Amino acid sequence: MIKIYVMESCPDCTEVKALYNGNPEYELIDIGKQARSLKEFLALRDHHPAFTKVRERGNIGIPCFVREDGSVAISLKHYDAGHFIEGTPVAQEGASCSLDGTGC
């Protein structure tokens, strides 16, 4: 199952939620609804090397797609129908909410 970290107040997450909500192959995890979910996401974001540039830019890194093998993609443009799009930098570019509000 692919985990998708989103947040209700994130405009970039709206399309992702509409596309994958109710699909049994995906688990939508709203990091704003439970502290446990936020803690799980922050542990991933703070330690996974795919988030290096996201952290440097002050972005949050959602929406975030995590496959069972641990590979990560941030933004819908790097993820399509269960596959990371070939030739794109995974979790290093693309839209992701910013702490200063400029990324959404």
Image (spheres, grey):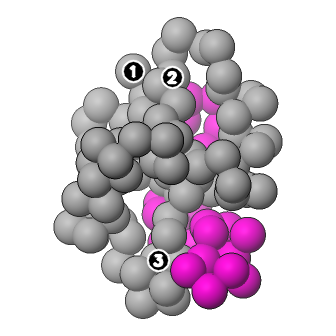
Residue 15 placement (x, y as % from top left) = 78, 42
Residue 53 placement (x, y as % from top left) = 43, 82
Q: Are marks 1 and 2 in contact (CB under 8 Å)?
A: yes
Q: Quadrant of the C terminus?
A: bottom right
- As drawn, the label of residue 1 is 1
The residue beneath circle 2 is 26
The residue beneath circle 3 is 54
Q: Is residue 3 left or right of residue 9?
A: left
Q: Which residues are magenta?
A: 78-104
Q: Quadrant of the N terminus?
A: top left
Relative height, residue 36 to residue 104 (above, below): above
Query: What residue type is disc 2 on?
Result: Tyr
Q: Is residue 10 left or right of residue 40?
A: right
Prevailing secondary structure class for the magenta stretch in the rendered image: loop
Q: CA distance from mark 1 to mark 2?
A: 6 Å
Does the image show residue 71? no
Residue 55 occupies which quadrant of the picture?
bottom left
Residue 42 occupies which quadrant of the picture?
bottom left
Residue furthest top in the image: 24
Query: What residue type is disc 3 on?
Result: Val
